[in-house]
Image (cartoon, helix red, strand yellow):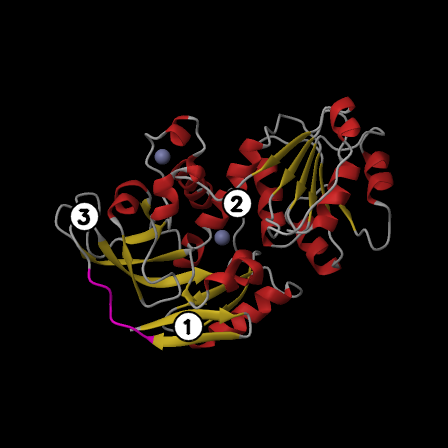
Amino acid sequence: MKAARYYSNDDVRVEKVPVPEIGPEEILVEVKACGVCGSDVMEWYMKPRAPLFFGHEPAGVVCQVGKGVENLSVGDRVFVHHHVPCFVCHYCRRESYTMCRTFKETRLYPGGFAEYIRVPAPNVRTDVLKLPQEVSFEEGSLIEPMACCLRGIKRANLQLGDTVLIMGAGFTGLVHLQLVKILGAGLVIVSDFLDFKLEKAKELGADVVINPGREDTLEKIKEVNEARAPDIVVVTPGSIEALKEGIRLAGKGATLYQYGPTSPEATLSIVPHQFFFSEITFVASYSSSPLETRTILEYIYQKRIDTDELITHHFGLEQIGRAVKLTAEAKRSLKVLVKMGE
Ligand SMILES: [Zn+2]
Ligand SMILES: [Zn+2]
């Protein structure tokens, strides 16, 4: 079968590998769609581990079940979560599911950008979700990245009526936008340097959009928010510049929420005086758990969250190099999908 292997953002190869064999309690899934994640094109994250099989947002059809699998059958259309927690360790008991050792050790083989994947037993038990007929494979592949956004919003302790600023109107910014509205935010403001993304944000329900290239974000927010800074600042770009700006924009009692990861070398100096006297909370959120994936599937099924506007491109597995480049460029695209058999 074919599987894509990452060497660098400019060098992704489709290689021939044997179809994985499965053991007891495992399943084999024929992948139908898998999204390209921002982290798939972060070279500081990927290159030290390269070459590697990748892709962690797959949806497909169960085509083989191992002995002892009772909750799934051949032919089931499914979303597959690549990591799952154990639910019993110290970290899981504190609801830090993504810090769990099992979470880090469970993985799909070879990776979502392959014709077939082996799903380990803990994942089969905990976070392979059957997709209703009304939910497409493309939508199924959005469950994982959307679940990551939902978990972050929960960690940021969004309260009913909060004014939320979302920095960045890429895929994750637009997902945060829709989710905070579902979850009861008041005024929702979205900022981005690209007007086409701000247009999308407006279509998807942003109350106010700001292009910081043309106007000062804080002044504009104060104009529309009773002279206050926002209660929650969602920083979706994984950059120090964005975090610095987020700190500047955080209001009294605000939560600064880092969504996009930064490299191990990147540092940021803060003024603890501001954090203390404005009681600013810093929150980061890494990945998602089986709690959020179920909620997201329900939101998609109920059509409470728009998926059509978010998928801007799709490519066949052979064209994965183009999918990776387009995502890395982060200009014209929102979510880029790889669809097997295209
Ligand atoms: Zn991801
Ligand atoms: Zn655990």
The kind of residue on which mark 2 rests is: Ile
Quarter that holds the N terminus:
bottom left
The kind of residue on which mark 3 rests is: Glu
Image coordinates for residue 172, horizontal then vertical, percent = 59, 50
Residue 317's tag is 1
In the depicted view, which residue is nearer to us: 161 or 273?
A: 273
The residue sitting at 36% across, 63% down in the picture is: 32
215 in relation to 220, above or below: below
Which stretch appears magenta? 16-21
Of the residues tagged 3 and 1, which is closer to the observer? Answer: 3
Residue 85 falls in image quadrant: top left
272 in relation to 136, above or below: above
Image coordinates for residue 266, horizontal then vertical, percent = 66, 50
Horizontal relation, residue 248 to residue 295: left or right: right
Horizontal relation, residue 312 to residue 235: left or right: left
Image coordinates for residue 5, horizontal then vertical, percent = 42, 70
The residue wearing badge 3 is 25
The residue wearing badge 2 is 305
The kind of residue on which mark 1 rests is: Leu
Horizontal relation, residue 167 to residue 341: left or right: right
Distance, label 2 to label 3, CA atoms, is: 33 Å
Of the residues tagged 2 and 1, which is closer to the observer? Answer: 1
**Which residue is outermost to the front?**
265
The numbered mark, 3 or 1, whose residue comes first in the sequence reads 3
For the residue labelled by badge 3, is the local secondary structure a helix, a strand or a loop?
loop
